[in-house]
Image: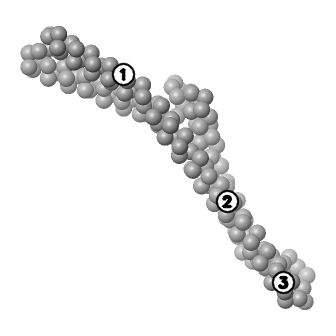
């Protein structure tokens, strides 16, 4: 006998699974929105200035500090050896400065490429968990419905 309420046609865990999926979706929503905004900034080439991706800005700042420190250390070493005013020292410092500038310029592109590579997986992880929870609920409901039909 089929019994009349919803409890007989739905898995008792369906509501819990739906709640869990909705909770995961709600928790992931701010992170998902932020990732989408940042991915949009990367795709638009907006890698510099205020309001961009903090990781890229921090990477650029760290590269600038490292390049400046390397230049300062080399200048100090050249001064200790007495070669600070030589043409060779000027060439070394020029090459070092140029290499530092190139390294700083490469940071946003490198980080943007890495960011684009990982963002879909991060966004998909939350979505996959939500869909997985809902799919489990649906599957449980279908199994419960099938068992109700076979019993009746």
Binning the other alpha carbons within 10 Å of mark 2 as few (below 14), some (14 to 19) or many (20 upward) gives: many
Q: CA distance from mark 1 to mark 2?
A: 45 Å
| Residue receiving disc 1 | 101
Which of the labelled discs sits on residue 148, or is there none? Answer: 3
| The image quarter in which residue 17 lies | bottom right
Question: Can residue 23 be seen by looking at this rendering?
Answer: no
Residue 149: quadrant of the picture: bottom right
Report helix, strand or loop for mark 2: helix
Left or right? Give the position of 53 relative to 123. Answer: left
* Place of residue 120 in the rendered image (x, y in percent of width and height, measured from the top left): 59, 47
The residue singled out by tag 2 in the image is 130
Q: Can you say whether 79 is above or below 69 in the image?
A: above
Above or below: residue 19 compared with residue 122: below
Q: Are marks 3 and 1 in contact (CB under 8 Å)?
A: no
In the rendered structure, are the residues bearing label 3 and label 2 in contact, judged by CB atoms less than 8 Å apart?
A: no
Could you tell which of marks 3 and 2 lies nearer the N-terminus?
2
Whole-percent x, y for residue 72 in the image: 23, 22
Q: Earlier in the sequence, mark 3 or mark 1?
A: 1
- As drawn, which residue projects farthest toward the left? 81
Is residue 76 or residue 119 the one in the foreground?
119
Secondary structure category for the residue under label 3: helix
Q: Position of residue 44 (x, y in %)?
A: 60, 28
Which one is nearer the viewer's eye here, 37 or 104? Answer: 104
Horizontally, residue 104 falls left or right of residue 122, namely left
Residue at position x 56%, y 27% from top? 46
Badge 3 local density, few (<14 within 10 Å), some, or many (20+)?
Answer: some
């Amino acid at each position: 006998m089929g019994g009349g309420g919803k409890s007989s046609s739905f898995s008792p865990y369906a509501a819990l699974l739906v709640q869990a999926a909705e909770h995961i979706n709600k928790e992931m929503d701010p992170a998902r929105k932020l990732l989408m905004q940042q991915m949009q900034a990367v795709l638009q080439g907006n890698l510099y200035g205020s309001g961009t991706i903090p990781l890229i800005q921090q990477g650029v700042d760290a590269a600038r500090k490292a390049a400046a420190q390397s230049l300062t250390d080399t200048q100090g070493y050249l001064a200790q050896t007495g070669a600070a005013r030589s043409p060779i020292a000027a060439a070394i410092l020029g090459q070092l400065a140029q290499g530092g500038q190139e390294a700083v310029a490469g940071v946003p592109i490198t980080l943007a490429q890495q960011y684009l590579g990982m963002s879909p997986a991060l966004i998909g992880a939350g979505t996959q968990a939500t869909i997985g929870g809902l799919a489990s609920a649906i599957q449980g409901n279908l199994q419960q419905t099938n068992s109700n039909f076979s019993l009746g």
